[in-house]
Structure formats: C-alpha cells, structure tokens
Image (spheres, rainbow, N blue to C red):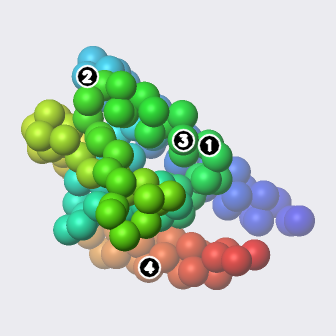
Amino acid sequence: MNSQELNFSRLLHLTAHAWRQAIDRRMKDNGLSMSSWMAVATIAIQETPISQKELAQALGLEDASVVPLIDRLVKQQLVERIQPEEDRRKRLLHVTPQGETLYQRLKVEADALRNELLANVDKDDLAVTQRVLQQLLIATEGK
C-alpha cells in the first residue's frame, strides 16, 4: 500500500472516529452514546416497526451485538419490542412516545452539530465528498 492509500484510509478512519466522538460528547448529557442515538433515530424514522435484524443491518452491526443495545433502550423506555401475531418468534422494534420526544430534541442538536462541523466546507466539495463516500460504501458492500 502506497503512502497516498495509507493516508486516505487513515484519514477516513480518523475522521469517522472524531465525528462519532463529537456526537458522543453532545449526546452524553442526554444519557445516550452515538450507537444508542443512531438506533433510536433509525427506529424513529421508520414508517412501520422493524426487526432486530433490520436494525443491525442498518447500523452495520452483528445481530448478536445489537441485542444488548436494544435491551438498554428498552430499559430506558425509549424503544419497545412488539411481538406480531403472525410470527410469535419475531420481535419488532418501535420507538416509544418518550423515545420519539427524545429523538426530536436530539435531532435538533445533531443537525446543529453537523451544521457547525460543515460550516467551513465548500458546498461543491461537500457534494463531491458525499458522492465519493457513497461510491465507497456501495463498493465495499459484500466484500
């Protein structure tokens, strides 16, 4: 791997890590980590309840590692598990009214943070960056 490839990979990793830490710092006062916030947000934006497997896929996590996360959110009364009548083995996830209220409040904070972080980034540069990241995401799926 040449130095340009190494720098790109390292920069991508460090930027993602720093972004997560910035969100964690903002959400900490509300008792949520970024993974908790992303889980609540992912469930909240769904039109219908989603399965634990679908949540794991949306968050890029293994099925087994999403269970403790969901358990914490259920304990905090932000998410509830629903058992559909047609399949008693399945558990669907739905955000509670308390979780929806928190999601709406934190979405405002997350949007403000994103706007702060991107305030000095040229709009055209940002558009190119988003296209490149989307291409990389598609290219890495299934690899």
The residues bearing labels 2 and 1 have C-alpha atoms spaced at a distance of 22 Å
Mark 4 and mark 1 residues within 8 Å of each other at the beta carbon: no
Q: Residue at x 89, y 65 (%)?
A: 1
Q: Nearer the viewer, mark 3 or mark 4?
A: 3
Which circle's residue, 2 or 4, is located before the other in the chain?
2
Q: 101 or 143: nearer the eye?
A: 101
Circle 4: is it few (<14), some (14-19), or many (20+) Cα within 10 Å?
few
Q: Give the residue type at disc 4.
A: Arg
Residue beneath disc 1: 65
Circle 1: is it few (<14), some (14-19), or many (20+) Cα within 10 Å?
few
The image's mark for residue 30 is: 2
Q: x and y percent of residue 36 in the render?
A: 40, 37
Circle 1: element type = helix
Q: Nearer the viewer, mark 2 or mark 1?
A: 1
Which circle's residue, 3 or 4, is located before the other in the chain?
3
Residue beneath disc 3: 67
Q: 129 or 40: nearer the eye?
A: 40
Circle 2: element type = loop
The residues bearing labels 2 and 4 have C-alpha atoms spaced at a distance of 32 Å
Q: Give the residue type at disc 2.
A: Asn
Q: Is residue 127 above or below residue 91?
A: below
Circle 2: is it few (<14), some (14-19), or many (20+) Cα within 10 Å?
few
Q: 97 or 35: nearer the eye?
A: 97
**Residue farthest along the right direction in this orientation:** 1
